[in-house]
Structures are given as structure tokens and as C-alpha cells.
Image (spheres, helix red, strand yellow):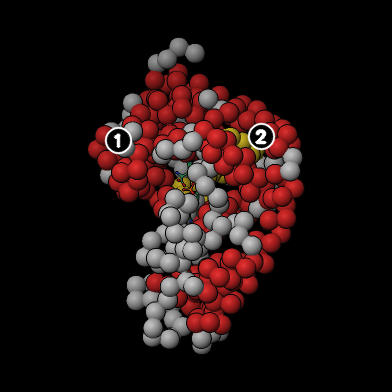
Amino acid sequence: MMRVLSGIQPSGTIHLGNYLGAIRNWVAEQHEDAYYCVVDLHSLTLPIEPSELRENTLECAASLLASGIDPERCTFFLQSHVPYHPQLAWLLECVATMGELNRMTQYKEKSEKSQGKVGLFTYPVLMAADILLYDAVSVPVGDDQRQHIELARNLAERFNTRYGPTFVVPEGAIPTAGARVMDLQQPERKMSKSVSSPLGTISLLDGADDVVKKVKKAVTDTDGDVRYDRVAKPGISNLLEILAALTNSTPQGIAEHFERYGDLKMAVAEAITNTFRPVQERYETYMADPAELRRVMSIGADRASLVAAETYRRAAAAVGLIN
Ligand code: AMP
Ligand code: TRP
């Protein structure tokens, strides 16, 4: 079995991009030896109220379980419950360089909002620690995480060269369709939890009426031709990709089935609601029982800690810390 690890920030409601780019692939990989975590420490890199972080974390955990993450088949946990994550991040910070962190595009995009906080700058190193602690071979993520995965690989290789074989060098697993779902109102920007365009983002918890409304209003173009061309037709291409991802097909193949934008939009809205409806029903069940959520997460933390402790000790010993 292959060791798989991934994480998601509890910074807002999970959206269609998270679902297609990451979560459904997490579910698909559960037959492997999978570790999935809600990376709550990462959410502290941008301003967030304590009460909001608490609520988001429970909602995020419930959403993942409702999406099909099965805590009996994988190890599902909260990052902050396993203190080895920031501990290993420290060892890796002493291997990482300012120069390589300066090159991270996500940092550049978000830095205005973080008001110069150091945590946002070093965040990719914490992400590398999340991955390397579990000897993960495969990391299912969306396209926007490519650069962070590359950094994790570089840090692992540098550490291994400097201190001897310690870490497994991971690979990103980025899906062919749905790896970069775009904002429906601004199809040149990726769909995101933080964007203040509620019409452009489809939440996992949106009801059918909202989904239909948002998809109908999705920005397209005026040439009236249903064709896949990300550059010339970003809006239509985004809808084609969404439908392709939801139906395990290709955007080019889907385009052949539609002549009118309106018909394509109705099919996209229907595919989304059909996928999300059962998830929303299960979500309510999980949210109604927070004690059960906590129980599940505490079992996950115990399991994750066993693996993380072992790797951390190996890394600590390698750099010369006395175990
Ligand atoms: P985040 O919301 O930044 O914690 O992202 C959680 C996961 O969702 C990561 O694997 C991201 O790469 C993925 N993701 C986030 N936004 C999108 C998007 N618009 N399209 C596809 N995947 C995404
Ligand atoms: N940085 C990722 C994001 O913003 C979330 C993340 C944190 C992650 N740790 C991870 C993803 C480890 C994969 C593996 O989406």
C-alpha cells in the first residue's frame, strides 16, 4: 500500500474547487494507507477570530466526513493535535532558505492580508513538515499547491543529503480535470475560500436554488460557441471542466454534446446538486453530534502521533539532537 497524505485549511466553507481538486481524490485514495488532516495551524497565518476558527474547524471536519472520508479506513485528524508538525517544521526551517520561500507565489498573493506576519512566510515549511512526518509518497492536491510540493521535495532531498537518508521524497498527485476550478464571476481567478465574491464560489453546502442561480449567472462570452479553450473562453472552459470532472469525462468530449450555453449551464448545475445533495444530508448528521466528531478526531490524533513521533525522532537524531 502507498502512503498518502493531504490537508485542508479550515479557513472557510469548503467549495467546489476544494471538492474537485482535492477531497474527492482523497476519498478515492482511501484504499491506500491514507492520512488526511484539517490543517488548523495553517489557518492562523491570516487574521481569523478564535470563535471563527473553532467553528470552521468543526464544520470542515464534518464536511470531509460527509464527503466520504471514512475514519475507519484512513487516519483523519487535526494538525494541532499532533505537536510534531511544528516541531519538525522548526528543523526544516533550519534547512530552508529565505530565497526559496521568497519565491512562493501564494505568499506573494496573500502577504498584503497578513500584515507582514512571519507565519505566512514560513507556512510552506510547515506544510512540508505535514507531508514528511508521515513518509508520504503521494500528496493529492489541486494545481495551486504544485510549488509547495516542490519545496517539500527539495527540503527532503537537501535534508537527506546533509544528514543522511531520513525522509521519503513525496510526489504531488494532481487530477487531470478539476485541478483548478475558476471563480464563476472572474474566470481568470481560481475559486477560493477568501474571495469576497459569493456569486463566484459554489459552497459544498449551497442548496440547489443557489447552485442554479450561481451557475446561470456565471460569466461567459458572446461568441456563442461551446468550445474548450482556456485562454480565449475561460468562463465556458471552466464550466466544461467542472462537468468533465463530475462525470469522469473530458472537457472536449463534453463540449461536443452542447450547442447552447444555457443547456450547458443547466447540466453543470444539475451535476453539482446531484453530487452535493447526499453530502449535505450527511453533514447535518455530523454537525448535530459534535461529541462524536471530537471522538473521531481524537482517535485519529492518536494514530497519527504514533507515526509522526517515529519520524520526528529520526529527524531529530539525524541533526544531532539527543533523543
Ligand atoms: P485550501 O482551501 O487552500 O486549504 O485547499 C485545500 C485543497 O483544495 C488543496 O489541495 C488545494 O490545491 C485545493 N484547491 C483549492 N482551491 C482550488 C480550486 N479553485 N480548484 C481546485 N483545487 C483547489
Ligand atoms: N497548503 C495547502 C493549501 O493551502 C494545505 C496543506 C497544508 C496541505 N498542509 C498540507 C496540503 C499537506 C497537502 C499536504 O491548500
Q: Secondary structure at mark 1?
A: loop
Seen in the picture, residue 213 relative to 170 is either above or below; the reply is below
The amino acid beneath tag 1 is: Gly
Q: Is residue 83 left or right of residue 160?
A: right
Q: Which mark is residue 24?
A: none
Q: Along the polypeptide, which appears first: circle 2 or circle 1? A: 1
Tell which of 95 and 145 is nearer to you.
145
**Is residue 114 visible to us here?**
yes
Picture quarter containing residue 280? Answer: bottom right
The answer, for residue 69, to whether it is visible in the render is no
Q: Secondary structure at mark 2?
A: helix
Q: Residues within 10 Å of mark 1 (few under 14, many from 20)?
A: few
The image shows residue 202 at horizontal and vertical percentages of 54, 61
Find residue 188 and report its image quarter: bottom left
Mark 1 lies on residue: 116
- Residue assigned mark 2: 297
Q: Nearer the viewer, mark 2 or mark 1?
A: 1
Residue at image point 45% right, 18% down? 317
Quarter location, residue 227: bottom left
Vertical placement of 218 versus 119: above or below? below
Give x and y (percent) for residue 267: 59, 76
Q: Residue furthest top?
A: 322
> Residue 102 location in percent, x, y?
27, 40
Residue placed most toward the observer, 252 or 185 = 185
Looking at this view, name the residue that lies furthest to the left.
99
